[in-house]
Amino acid sequence: MIKLTSLAHGGGCGCKLSPGVLRELLADMPAASNFPNLLVGTETGDDAAVYQLDEDTCIIATTDFFMPVVDDPGDFGRIAATNAISDIYAMGGRPIMALAILGMPLDKVSPETVGKILRGGAEKCAEAGIPVAGGHSIDAPEPIYGLAVIGTCATRHIRRNSAAQAGDVLILTKGLGVGIYSAALKKDELGDEGYAELIASTTLLNQIGTELAKEEAVHAITDVTGFGLLGHGLEVARGSDMTLKIEVDKVPLLTRAAELTQSGFVTGASHRNWDSYGEEVVLPEGFPDWQRHLLSDPQTSGGLLVAVEAAHADQVLSNLHQAGYASARRIGEVVEGPPQVQII
């Protein structure tokens, strides 16, 4: 059987265009100011679009797809679906249905394998309580799968990535290292335990976002995916016009992430991400490259980055742990200052 990852030039959210290229492409997009009901568009690089239907109700729409990050077709489907649905949760919403996006090189991938991918995605949608209500498929040179997802949310519960406030505590709900694990997997250096940890993390739905958004003390939420912790943190900093201070020693990691990074398992996307951040990411003098790669590592189906009022941070963290997000940690704070991410 042909390995799915061998058919793609990249995998998972590491396939994304770099943050710098994306900003350049979106710079000339027409302004959405003529659509007052569009509460969230492309202006702050948020996780999904939000359109207000009436005083109390919003529709959330997103799409996400990528090439295989693993070879098992069912796992690929589950990871891709979990990743796509996450954008709805990151806005504080509840998903209601999904549409499948499929591109397959039919001369190389059997219908049986494609069926396993689709069933894996449908399985995670069922876990999220939504149907796969349709979709679109093409014959493509590389395997691609993902979802367009629609959700709803009460207007007061929408949580953007641009509303962090000075004094907020930053919480990250999953460990970093997915891109690093993926690089090791491709070279058969990950092992069974590492693979199991990779799948457990990337198929853990970010459903807690819906509940977090109901808390007034939670000011901002985003999910950490292809741009790495630094890239998505920088979007929060820019949108909120604040400085994010992140304590590197408190950032949760997958078990072997540090070891594998120091052994050279780094993705090309990590380098592209770093080159895009510019001077808005500030590192301590002498900061080691391997730690920098951890912070710029592209996360496929990563965790939520949450900005919460300091007085409520411990309770939010406790709720996360009780809900099954065992890796959730306080990783820093939001302070007055220029829009940048400082690593301390």
Image (spheres, rainbow, N blue to C red):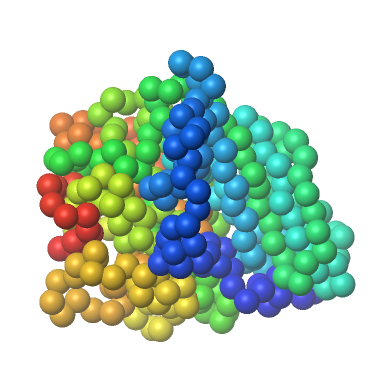
In the displayed structure, would residue 188 be above or below residue 175?
A: below
Question: Residue 122: horizontal and vertical position, in percent?
Answer: 71, 43
Q: Nearer the viewer, residue 165 or 54?
A: 54
Q: Nearer the viewer, residue 75 or 209?
A: 209
Q: What residue lies at 22% left-to-right and 54% top-to-bottom?
A: 339
- The image quarter containing residue 220 is top left
165 left or right, relative to 104 = left
- If the image is split into quadrants, where does the N terminus sit? bottom right
69 left or right, relative to 233 = right
Q: What residue lies at 55% left-to-right and 74% top-to-bottom?
A: 185
Q: What residue lies at 72% left-to-right and 66% top-to-bottom?
A: 143
- The image quarter containing residue 158 is top left
Question: Residue 284: horizontal and vertical position, in percent?
Answer: 14, 71
Q: Nearer the viewer, residue 59 or 312?
A: 59
169 left or right, relative to 301 = left
Q: What residue lies at 34% left-to-right and 47% top-to-bottom?
A: 305
In the displayed structure, would residue 267 be above or below residue 93?
A: below
In the displayed structure, would residue 57 be above or below residue 231?
A: above
